[in-house]
Image (cartoon, rainbow, N blue to C red):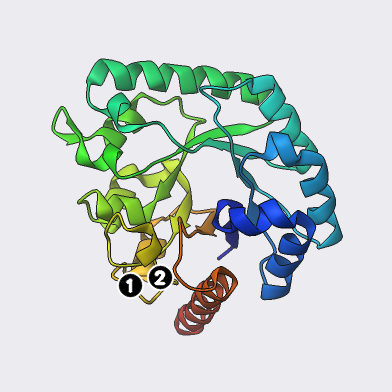
């Protein structure tokens, strides 16, 4: 199993010292990261990743609201092969026609991405699971409208906060899911209450097992009350020890 870190987790540290923060990430044991806002930081970030032997298989960028050519060009420079749109607010997920329009825009983005050799995906929050369209969650309805080459990055914590079972949703979405966000906590909207993997209410290893076409599991905290570097280190240690244990019993 391959693990990465969503760098939004460390946004405060990155704003103060990008190279030093990337070095800490490598020292903790991560070999992969998922950048955000990477158009603005591409040169400095690229140098820091190279210096610390890190790769970025995926990255977040607002494909539906910013210059796509600029995004894909920066992604290519950083070696990002999948660009994921991270966020569309709740009002976009209440009506079938709005979801259809979003799916078509993302399908168009994917066609442009293909010209750069880059795959396109989408990352959910809670509202895509709280809204029901034609008897299923808005996320499932959305998935049914996407072209075959599109992928999903399922934020499994927000699935649970949205009132759904992430194991069940991952089974329903099937091979479309190539990335997941791994986070834990009390399943509330209080981001500061989030916890390292294995310390909250999410059955983390069951969730990972349910993503049968998973390429990378991405550790993320939206926020954290403790030392964030300790938090990500605890998450990685939990994931590595449990992955090793499962491998030994397989």
- Extreme-front residue of the structure: 16
The answer to whether marks 1 and 2 mark residues whose Cβ atoms lie closer than 8 Å is yes
Q: Earlier in the sequence, mark 1 or mark 2?
A: 2
The residue located at (71%, 62%) in the rendering is: 21
Q: Quadrant of residue 91?
A: top left
The residue located at (27%, 61%) in the rendering is: 187
203 relative to 164 in the view: left or right:
right
The C terminus, quarter of image: bottom left
12 relative to 178 in the view: left or right:
right
Residue 184: in sight, yes or no?
Answer: no
111 and 15: which is toward the camera: 15
Q: Quadrant of residue 209?
A: bottom left
Q: Tell me how many marks there are.
A: 2
The N terminus, quarter of image: bottom right
59 and 226: which is toward the camera: 226
Residue 98: in sight, yes or no?
Answer: yes
Q: Using a 10 Å C-alpha cutoff, classify the residue at mark 1 as few (fewer than 14 neighbours), some (14 to 19) or many (20 or more).
A: some
**Residue 65 image offset from top left, x and y in percent:** 53, 22
Secondary structure found at label 2: loop
Distance from the alpha carbon under mark 1 to that under mark 2: 6 Å
**Residue 15 image offset from top left, x and y in percent:** 68, 51
Q: Using a 10 Å C-alpha cutoff, classify the residue at mark 2 as few (fewer than 14 neighbours), some (14 to 19) or many (20 or more).
A: many
**Residue 39 image offset from top left, x and y in percent:** 70, 34
The residue located at (55%, 68%) in the rendering is: 228
Task: Say which residue label 1 marks.
Answer: 200
The residue located at (46%, 79%) in the rendering is: 246
162 relative to 60 in the view: left or right:
left
Vertical comparison of 27 with 103: above or below = below
Task: Say which residue label 2 marks.
Answer: 195
**Residue 92 image offset from top left, x and y in percent:** 32, 25
Vertical comparison of 163 with 150: above or below = below
């Amino acid at each position: 199993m391959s693990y990465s870190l969503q760098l939004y987790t460390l946004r405060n540290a990155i704003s103060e010292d990008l190279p030093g923060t990337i070095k800490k990430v490598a020292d903790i044991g991560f070999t992969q990261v998922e950048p955000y806002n990477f158009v603005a930081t591409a040169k400095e970030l690229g140098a820091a990743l190279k210096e610390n032997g890190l790769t970025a298989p995926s990255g977040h960028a607002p494909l539906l609201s910013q210059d796509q050519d600029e995004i894909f060009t920066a992604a290519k420079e950083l070696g990002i092969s999948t660009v994921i749109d991270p966020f569309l607010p709740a009002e976009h997920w209440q009506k079938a026609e709005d979801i259809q329009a979003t799916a078509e825009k993302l399908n168009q983005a994917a066609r442009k991405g293909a010209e750069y050799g880059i795959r396109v995906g989408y990352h959910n929050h809670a509202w895509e699971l709280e809204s029901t369209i034609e008897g299923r969650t808005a996320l499932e309805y959305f998935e049914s409208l996407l072209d075959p080459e599109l992928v999903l990055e399922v934020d499994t914590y927000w699935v649970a906060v949205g009132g759904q079972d992430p194991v069940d949703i991952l089974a329903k979405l099937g091979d479309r899911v190539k990335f997941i966000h791994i986070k834990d906590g009390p399943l509330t909207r209080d981001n500061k209450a989030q916890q390292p993997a294995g310390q909250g209410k999410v059955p983390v290893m069951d969730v990972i097992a349910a993503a049968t076409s998973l390429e990378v599991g991405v550790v993320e905290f939206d926020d954290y009350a403790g030392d964030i570097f300790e938090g990500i280190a605890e998450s990685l240690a939990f994931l590595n020890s449990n992955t090793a244990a499962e491998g030994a019993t397989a």
